[in-house]
Image (spheres, grey):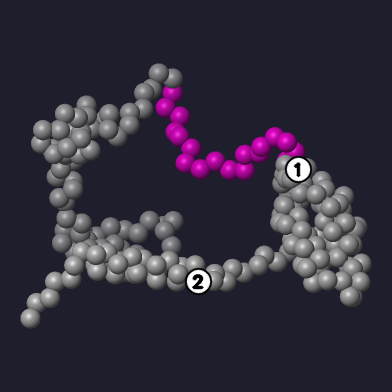
Amino acid sequence: MLVFKSLSVLKSFHLEQKLVTYARFVHHKFHLVKPSYDTDYLLNPANIPEIQHNIEHRKGVGNIQLVHELNSKLRSLPANAGEAERSQLNDQLQAELRKIPNRTHPGVLQHGADPKVVRYYNEKPSLGEGAKVFEFSEMTKKMNIFRMEKLGNFTGHKSYYLTGELAELTEAPCPPVHCTGDHFNFHNEGLTLERPTHVQ
C-alpha cells in the first residue's frame, strides 16, 4: 500500500531535521589547543630592552611593560582572591602575550632597514641589445601551431587548439627508459646514450 504524506507533514519533518542539525552544531565543542609562550624568556625583566627593540623592529603592537605589570598583579594576588578575578587577569595576560612578536634571528637584524638579496635563481641569459624575447603564445602564434582566439563558435572562449608540430608533439610516445651502469637505453628506439660524467 502506498501512502502519501501531506505537504505540511513533510515541511515539519524537514524543519525538525534542520533543528536537530543546528542543535548538534551548537552543542559541539571544539577543543582548540591553547598557545604556549616562552614565559621564561618573556617574563624575565632582563630581556625587556631586547623584546622592546624586537617589537619596534617588527612593527608590532605588543606592550612588554604591560605584560610584566599584569604578571606582577597575578602573582601578588592573595590566596583567598576570587577565581573570577584571577581568571580575568590571566585572560588579560594571555591576550597581551599574544601580541608580542616572535624573536628575530640575529642575522636579520644585521641587514638593517634595507632589504638584502641573498641569492638569484633562474637568471635570464643576456641576449644583447635589441634582442626581443617572445612568450610561448606569441612564438607559437607566429609559427601558426597554436590558436586560442576566435574559437567561440566551435568550443568556447577559454579553449585553444594545437596544430602542426605542436599537435604531433602531444601525441609523441614517450619511450620507456632503462638506466643501467653508464648507459641510458631507450628500448623502443634501440638507442644507447652514454651517461655524462657529471651525472651521479
| Nearer the observer, 157 or 119 | 157
Question: Where does residue 36 sit, x and y in percent of width and height?
Answer: 70, 66
Q: Which residue is mark 2?
A: 28
On the image, the x and y values in percent for residue 141 come to 22, 29
From the viewer's perspective, is 138 left or right of 60?
A: left
* Nearer-the-camera pick, 187 or 137: 137
Residue 18 falls in which quadrant of the image?
bottom left
- Is residue 141 at all visible to an observer of this figure? yes
Give the percent coordinates (x, y) of residue 1: 7, 81
Is 119 one of the magenta-colored residues?
yes
Q: Residue at x 90, y 68 (%)?
A: 77
Query: What's the residue type where badge 2 is placed?
Result: His
Mark before the other along the chain sequence, 1 or 2: 2
Residue 111 image offset from top left, x and y in percent:
73, 41
Label 2 environment density (alpha carbons within 10 Å; few <14, some 14–19, many ≥20): few
- Check residue 122 in the rendering and tell me which mark sits there, or answer none: none
Would you say 22 lies left or right of 89 here? left
Mark 1 nearby-residue class (10 Å; few <14, some 14–19, many ≥20): some
Measure how far apart labels 1 and 2 are at the Cα level.
Answer: 42 Å
* Dominant secondary structure of the residues highlighted in magenta in the image: loop
User: Which quadrant of the figure contains the C terminus?
Assistant: bottom left
Q: Quadrant of residue 3?
A: bottom left
User: For the residue marked with disc 1, what is the amino acid?
Assistant: His
Query: Visible in this render: residue 105?
Result: no
Give the SS element for disc 2.
loop
Q: Which residues are magenta?
A: 111-128
Q: Which residue is mark 1?
A: 57
